[in-house]
Image (cartoon, helix red, strand yellow):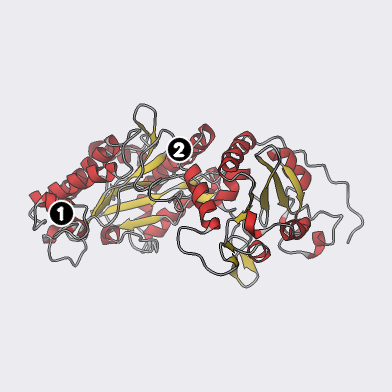
Amino acid sequence: MATGWAPTAEMAPACDDVAQYAAKRRALLSSRFPAETLVVPSGGFKVRANDTDYPFRPGSDFFWLTGCHEPDAVVILHPNPGGDHDAVLYVADRSDRSTAAFYTDRRYGELWVGPRAGVRETSAALEITCRPLDELADALARLSPATTRVIRSQDEQVDRAVLRYTPTGRGGSTPAGTDRDTELAQALSELRLVKDEHETALLEQAIAATVLGFSECVREMDHAMTLPNGERWLEGTFWRRARVDGNDVGYGSIVACGHHATTLHWVRDDGPVRPGDLALLDMGVESRSLYTADITRTLPVDGHFSDVQRQVYDVVLAAQQAGIEAVRPGAQFLDPHRAAMRVIAEALHDWGLLPVSVEESLAEDPEAPNAGLHRRYTLHSTSHMLGLDVHDCAHARDEAYRDGPLTAGMVLTAEPGLYFQPNDITVPPELRGIGVRIEDDILVTTEGHRNLSAALPRVRGEVENWMAQQRGA
């Protein structure tokens, strides 16, 4: 097996554009934890069934610091005498014909899965010092838990090798909020809140591909209506675009037609697509560099909104517009939500569906009588951060995220909705089974905001005209 092969061309990767940005990100993280060692793993393959794996995606914190897509890799930031850190990326070397793994390893051998970047190639592409992965165990063994912080639950080998340090010693548990590793995860999430120019460009690529995917779904609606599970046809149409223009979908696509649109996380996508119904499509392409779009449009399957659908849609659109207009530097993260919910609550009150005053329902004190009654019909918050994860920066502290101010460079969604369950007898029969959500991806700029997904129509008349154009009418 090891003989009779023609010479293999050398891999000579060019420097990846992400390298310079990843170096700056490591420097930012370094400044938060002087004189401490920081360990961030990429994670490994996860078994899907028996001897087959899910497609690998590196951990978002690891990728943000390195730009590396390889499984099982670990970056260690070692403090140096100058007061900052030296980064070493441990990555598996190539399983080429010089190794037994080339022929025998179904998970890594290049005969089985094709060539992958090794130590030399990764170092050249990402401009970072790389060492073979088989040296990692010794490197971890030399670390002191008292001066080391680790991103946990990504790599079992790392978790076992560097014990969690607590003020009382190795192992054990720590009161919430004082754990050193938790502080590292919080710091990474908070640094990732503000996107650099490279990240914004990658988000725009993902959004452009998503807009194209929505257009293709509209073109396929007539065929979807001929199938008993037409939602799946639309789901597959969008997934094809995600794979052609990106890495994958950024999250499980929601294709919810008719009363399925009232189920917030309808991901079964196995229902029919019927004329006269609304189709709620919540989908996003994940770019090849792993940044994801997150866009929702609620579309009339036959191309025209009915009178009652218009009534609901126009309120949600007005709520979304109020939320978008509240996005500006210095505003509180929750301000877009407050603005959108006021529009929603006022409409529900006008329709006679809110049994208390608008102010009573909008009260933010959870102990206040009648607070939040409007949420029966709207269910969720209006915004979340967006980036490498669809719900980005989830480990950030409340004071930096949920209760914090917006800053230029942040990207967040604006996605209010109204959902009238088919069996909700508190609403008129004509409203039951209608669900509407409209979602766009909003960049906070120095002067206000920019709707990154504005290319996809959302005003009702423009939506109807756009759908007709896509269908060639």
Question: In the image, residue 296 lies at what x, y percent?
Answer: 35, 47
Of all residues shown, which one is farthest toward the bottom? 50
Is residue 41 at least partly visible in the picture?
A: no
Label 2: few (<14), some or many (≥20) within 10 Å?
A: some
Q: Is residue 277 or residue 78 the one in the foreground?
A: 78
Give the number of the disc on residue 208: 2
Q: Residue at x 59, y 53 (%)?
A: 58
The residue lying at 7 percent from left, 54 percent from top is 352
Residue, disc 1: 361
Q: Give how far across and how far down residue 356 sits, in percent.
A: 9, 56
Report the residue that reaches farthest toward the right.
Answer: 3
Question: Looking at the picture, does residue 127 appear above or below residue 6?
Answer: above
Measuring from the top left, give residue 254's x and y in whole percent.
38, 56
Identity of the residue drawn at 35% across and 61% down: 266
* Tag 1: amino acid: Ser
Q: Is residue 470 left or right of residue 65?
A: left
Q: Secondary structure at mark 2?
A: helix
Give the secondary structure at mark 1: helix
**Three-letter code, disc 2:** Ala
Quarter of the image where the N terminus is located: bottom right
Foreground of the two, 118 or 106 = 118
Instruction: Give 228 or 101, whichever is nearer the viewer.
Output: 101
Q: Is residue 119 left or right of residue 357?
A: right
- Rendered image quadrant of residue 104: bottom right
Q: Position of residue 15 (x, y in %)?
A: 69, 35
In the depicted view, which residue is nearer to us: 134 or 435? Answer: 134
Judge whether 292 appears above or below 228 on screen: above
